Amino acid sequence: MTQPRPDLVGMEMWGGVELEKTIVNSILNMGYESPSEIQVESIPWQLNGRDVVAQAVTGSGKTAAFGIPMCNIVDPKSQDVQGLVLVPTRELAQQVQRELSLIGRDRGVGVVAVYGGEPIAKQIRALQKGMSIVVGTPGRLKDLMNRRILDLGYVRFAVLDEADEMLDIGFADDMEFILKRTPSTRQTSLFSATIPGFIRGLIRRYLDDPRWIQLVSHSNGIETVAEVDQIFYDVASQDKADGILEILDDVNDDSQVLIFRKMQVGVDRLAKGLAGEGFAIKGLHGGMSQSERNRVMDSFRDGSLKMLVATNLAARGLDIPAISHVINYDMPENIEEYVHRIGRTARMGKRGTAVSFIGEWDFELHEQIVAKIGEDKMIRRKFSFY
Ligand code: ADP
Ligand code: MG
């Protein structure tokens, strides 16, 4: 256990928010000079123990908006898990763990990520060191709980990041299982860029008199960041391969590009096809081994890999500020996924471009996007071959 530095004992203000000095020291070291809007609005409520439902656009700093109060609230000297963060993917678990470790560094807060696809023994060893905060995907969390390695009976603060995804049908039973095994006195925060109506009932089930913080101006609750250009092309399925070449021709060599496809096999095919055209590109999907996923993600994060084609696995939460282009080669299933996918670019005030291929099956979704996001935000273009 690290000894507290005497100069870092007590409280200090960070842009109007009162925090432990150790936390302020860490976040200043991360380069966070002042809080973002969602941080200003949501951190004080959470520090006061209030349940929070927080909606703010992609790339607005939601991780630190729950990570700062969580690192401030837990007792780093206790051996119990007091903070729990639930996330939908392994890659997001790794990323959130990294950010929370940095926030809690000078306070000595231990943060561990637990997720599938990697040897459980390593994660068990980490947990047995006495971690204050666990960031995890539902499957591996349940596994560790069933093995009686992980006891959530002392959790004081639980967060659902990408809350609407965590409460959707795919994870609903897992959430019930996990949250039922935490104290009912815990405080709970939900964070997402999208809060669709269907989760209202579940919010009542899991949260106690939550404070709603919705930093979206659109009354229908669907909002994309102002800094992203949203470009749409009509294209028949059989012409998408020509279309992507035309798009990539126009993209600067050192821009970082994330392409989305619907199916794993489509990801593999497109990665192979574009590699054959001379592009340095890799695929990312759930059918790959975790070590391969890690290799691809690491190289995309450090910028040595410029192009990535992925399934929805990469749609939510991933923060790679250098991504300049997101391309929907296949459109997503719904408008929320569209918002999250294009939110991989234009983060924290940066500019970005989102290109969407409207195929013969996508007219309905496209109409919805136009209606809910606004015609004024849409740029229509035509491929040269039409
Ligand atoms: P969101 O979860 O809202 O999509 P993230 O939490 O991933 O956004 O944050 C987006 C980016 O902003 C990250 O690169 C993060 O390091 C950075 N960031 C967060 N808070 C601050 C801050 N207060 N000052 C500067 N940068 C910040
Ligand atoms: Mg996030």
Image (tube, helix red, strand yellow):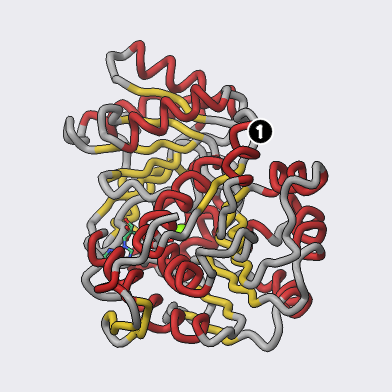
Image quarter in which the N terminus is found:
bottom left
Q: Nearer the viewer, residue 49 or 74?
A: 74
Residue 208: image location, x then y, percent: 71, 84
The vertical placement of 271 against 377, above or below, is above
Q: Amino acid at mark 1?
A: Ile
- Residue 264 visible in the shown view: yes
> Who's the residue at 47% across and 51% down the image?
97
The vertical placement of 374 against 280, above or below, is below
57 with respect to 205 (left or right): left
Q: Residues within 10 Å of mark 1 (few under 14, many from 20)?
A: some
377 with respect to 311 (left or right): left
Q: Nearer the viewer, residue 360 or 318?
A: 318
Residue beneath label 1, please?
120
Location of residue 165 by image quarter: bottom right
Residue 120: image location, x then y, percent: 66, 33
128 with respect to 62 (left or right): right
User: How many marks can you see?
Assistant: 1
> Who's the residue at 61% across and 61% down the image?
84
Residue 200: image location, x then y, percent: 71, 76
